[in-house]
Amino acid sequence: MVVNYNINLLAEAKASYTDGGIFAEFAWIIVVLPFLAALLITFFGKNLPLKGAEIALGSVFFIFLYSCILFYLNITKGVASEFFVNVGSIGSFEIEFGWVVDGLSIMMYFVVGTVSLLVFIYAINYMEGEIRYTFFFTSLTLFAGSMLVLVSAPTLLQLLIGWELVGVCSYLLIGHYWEEKENSSAAMKAFITNKVADVGLMIGIIILALTTGTLRISEILYQATHDYEAIKSVAYIAGILIFIGAMGKSAQFPLHVWLPDAMAGPTPVSALMHAATMVTAGVYLLGRLFPFYQGIAHQALDVVLIFGVITLFSAGLIAIVQDDLKKVLAYSTVSQLGYMVTAMGSGAYTAGLFHLWTHAFFKALLFLGAGSVIHAVHTNNMSEMGGLRKEMPRTFMTFIIGTVALAGLPPLAGFFSKDEILASLNHEGHNFFFIIAVAGAFITAFYMTRAVLLTFYGEYRGHGHPHESDSMMTTPLMVLAFFAAVAGWVNIPGIYTGFTNWVTTRKNGIIEHHPESFDYFALFSGLFAGLAGIGLAYYIYQVISNPENGDEKIKFQPVWRVLENKYYLDDFYFKYIVDPIKITFAKSVDKFNTEILDRFINNFGNVASFLGRVVYDKLDQGGIDKALNLTSTGTDTLGSKVKLIQTGKTQQYIMYFLTGVIVISVLVLLVL
Amino acid sequence: MSAQPFLIAAAALFSMGIYGILVRRNAVMVLLSIELILNAVNINFVVFNQMLSDVLLNGQIFAIFVITIAAAEVGIGLAIVLMLFRNRQTANINEFDLMKW
């Protein structure tokens, strides 16, 4: 049974919002479809002409179309409704699944749909001839479905399920080339790091559910914004715990360590999951629960802000020292996620989501561009690239667009979204964080310019003759480049602020600063930081040196070494968490297992075996079987005796008969 | 008129029949002996009917039934004996032990 609620009935809202009509009602199709597609690919994929890729592509194409329709509805009218399907109850908790169709989720549907479609097209060519081609598309389709389960979740339970499912898909896809130990370790690392964070999320959800008595997000948000005492008392701790979950998925310091390693997966996976969609789930979660954070958990929001700022700065610095092109982009992703979380932390809901929106396009573009380069030169290391702008003009042009968008130069996407975050920090009076965020913008511009110069300028330092990728790979690049260029234009302060309206259709009393016009201080700070970063990188790697040995100019020890070792965070984890668990804890558990549990179980087994022996010998063999055997042997013996009177001689029988008649007659006579 | 002589005659006939069944080795003779027993029974039926002055003549009617049955029985018996003879080339009843265990 499907129950439909117009969200606006739960909270004060503008009258112009609609419930989305039939398209919202059937939005479950886009969630279910990828799972069906994955099933079909599993069973029939290998026999199809494109080995299952066509089913995957078909399903994401449908998602894309459907999300376009929803997106259009949201732009024109504004949609806000949610649907519940009750599947049972545990105690007083109704177990409900469903789908939300409101501005936030539609924005995510659109991002997932668009980026998935382009990445799938790209992957068909990129993955050609690779091992487990069909399985790759199964997992990727499964991921699209899981991500939609996550973003369409109207209840925390469904959200958690989607959350874990994308984690599993991430694990499968990072470990796609699991034959190499490094890759399977990376997959394991991603999974376990996320699992550590998920424990926080799960406890947070349990706390919220127990205090509010419901799993519905809209109901929880309603309670959070309407002075309910119970939820107020747990707001801080629940907010922190849920943020820990977001820290895992959105790779916030210090749980970001898995994301750079996740680059072991194929590049389309990095583009789709570890740049555009999955890693933004944490930001999405903060956005979904934003009224809760802003209303009653604003102390938790301060923690969010601090971790966001730490992440954006520290990850950006590491990106400078990376030689692996994909790792530069990975640390850049961590850093940009830091920006989004910072925005959320500073109370800028729209700015955070806006950065999510623009980042999804330009970072997917950069990853796919990097994939195109890697496909051509067969290495991830920038030290073996160089001079590719002549050989790969289309990849180069689109990569430049992505870089400029990320560096935050107008009029490309990153400029507007980053500016909005800076403006928000400035407005809220977080001066120190504002300076760090501006420094982050500088660093971003610096490492991206460095990456471009090392990859596309100078002399080619690798082997063979790289050439431009197939049009099936460059077309998605161009489409994404278009989005990277224009995606920022949907939210220009003072000119057009459509995006703000799109993502705030669920009016749960979000109070945020909507700049009426540009904050020129923030704008020029960000712009100059970006330009300075590009300029400095150009100066170091082109003017006073060349891309090959530009790194020599900035190798300030010991900072460089600390950065190269990623702040020794991995070593710290290994020394103080993994190894103690592996050596001390695991050993003692093993000891407990072998010496106590096993002994107990062995003894139990021995006793049971002894009892079984007794029962078998005495009761079964000695009692029942013996009785049965006796019956049969007795019958047999008796029969062999009795059968002797069956001589077959008729006259003898008559003799017996007559004797019997005479005896009976005599007896009758005597008795009578 | 006393029934005793008739009953003695019937008993004698019956005894002869029993004797014949027990001692004759020829299967045909055994069948004949069975006929003797049946006839002894018939005599008894007729005699007791006369003694009891049964106007419905149940005894006589029964005797006729017995004769009919006896004819049928002899028919079957002789057929069996004939088949046995064909298979075994003998009618000696001691040779037939098909009913042995």
Image (cartoon, grey):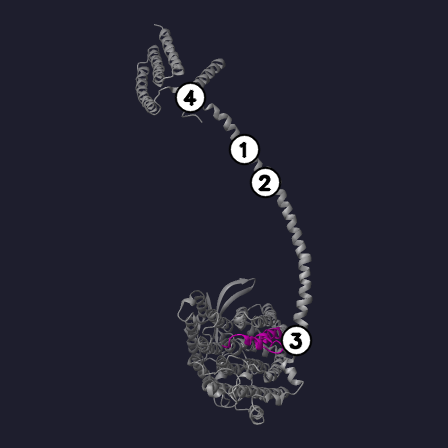
Give amino acid for label 3.
Asp
Regarding residue A501, the answer to whether it shows in the image is yes
Regarding residue A504, the answer to whether it shows in the image is no
Give amino acid for label 1.
Thr
Q: Secondary structure at mark 1?
A: helix
Q: Which residue is mark 3?
A: A571
Coordinates of residue A24 in the picture (x, y in percent): 44, 73
Q: Nearer the viewer, mark 3 or mark 2?
A: 3
* Comes first in the chain, label 3 or label 4: 3
Q: Secondary structure at mark 4?
A: loop
Q: Nearer the viewer, mark 2 or mark 4?
A: 4
* Distance between the alpha carbons at the discs numbered 3 and 2: 63 Å
Q: Which residue is mark 4?
A: A649
* Residue count near mark 2 (Cα–Cα under 10 Å), binned few <14, some 14–19, many ≥20: some
* Distance between the alpha carbons at the discs numbered 3 and 1: 78 Å
* Comes first in the chain, label 3 or label 1: 3
Circle 4 marks a residue in which chain? A
* Distance between the alpha carbons at the discs numbered 4 and 1: 31 Å
* Comes first in the chain, label 3 or label 2: 3
* Distance between the alpha carbons at the discs numbered 3 and 4: 104 Å
* Residue count near mark 4 (Cα–Cα under 10 Å), binned few <14, some 14–19, many ≥20: some
Q: Nearer the viewer, residue A656 or A228?
A: A656
Q: Are marks 4 and 1 in contact (CB under 8 Å)?
A: no
* Residue count near mark 1 (Cα–Cα under 10 Å), binned few <14, some 14–19, many ≥20: few
Q: Nearer the viewer, mark 3 or mark 1?
A: 3
User: Which residues, given as a range, are shown in magenta?
Assistant: A238-267
Q: Which residue is mark 2?
A: A620
Circle 1 marks a residue in which chain? A
